[in-house]
Amino acid sequence: MQKSAFDALPEKIQTALLESAHESAEWQRSYVEDQETPLLDALKEKGVKITRPDPAPFRKASIPLYKEMLKSDSQKALFDALTAE
C-alpha cells in the first residue's frame, strides 16, 4: 500500500492494519517454527549436525551496505522500523 493511501485512512483503520500486520508476522514465525521443528528433529536423529550461527555479526556487518543503498526518506524509515530492537 502506498504511504499516501495509508495516510489517507482513518487513524482507527491505520492502527488496526498495523496491529494485524504485527499479529500475522508473529503467527507466521510461530507456524514456520512449528513446521521446522519436527523436520530438524528427524534430521538430528539421522545424525545430521544442525548449525545455528549467531546472526548478530552478519546483521551488524550488513548495516553500512543497506544504509548506502537506501535513498529516500521512506526507505530509510522502513529500514529503521524493520531493524529496531
Image: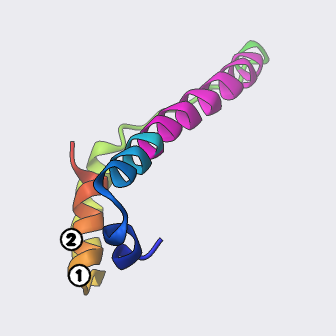
Residue shown at 66% from the left, 21% from the top:
37
- What residue span does the magenta drawing correspond to? 21-43
Residue 28: which quarter of the image? Answer: top right
Residue type at mark 2 is Pro
Locate residue 16, reporting x and y percent: 40, 44
Mark number displayed over residue 68 = 1
Q: Going by the picture, which residue comes out furthest to the top?
A: 45
Mark 2 is surrounded, within 10 Å at the Cα level, by few (under 14), some (14 to 19) or many (20 or more) other residues, namely: few
Q: Which residue is mark 2?
A: 64
State whether residue 78 is above or below residue 16. Answer: below
Locate residue 62, reporting x and y percent: 29, 64
Residue type at mark 1 is Glu
Residue shown at 23% from the left, 55% from the top:
60
Tag 1 near tag 2, CB within 8 Å? yes
State whether residue 41 is above or below residue 23. Answer: above
In this picture, residue 7 sits left or right of residue 23: left
Mark 1 is surrounded, within 10 Å at the Cα level, by few (under 14), some (14 to 19) or many (20 or more) other residues, namely: few
Q: Secondary structure at mark 2?
A: helix
Q: Is residue 5 magenta?
A: no
In this picture, residue 5 sits left or right of residue 24: left
- Please indicate, yes or no, whether residue 65 appears anywhere in the rendered image: no
> Between marks 1 and 2, how big is the CA–CA gap?
6 Å
In this picture, residue 76 sits left or right of residue 36: left
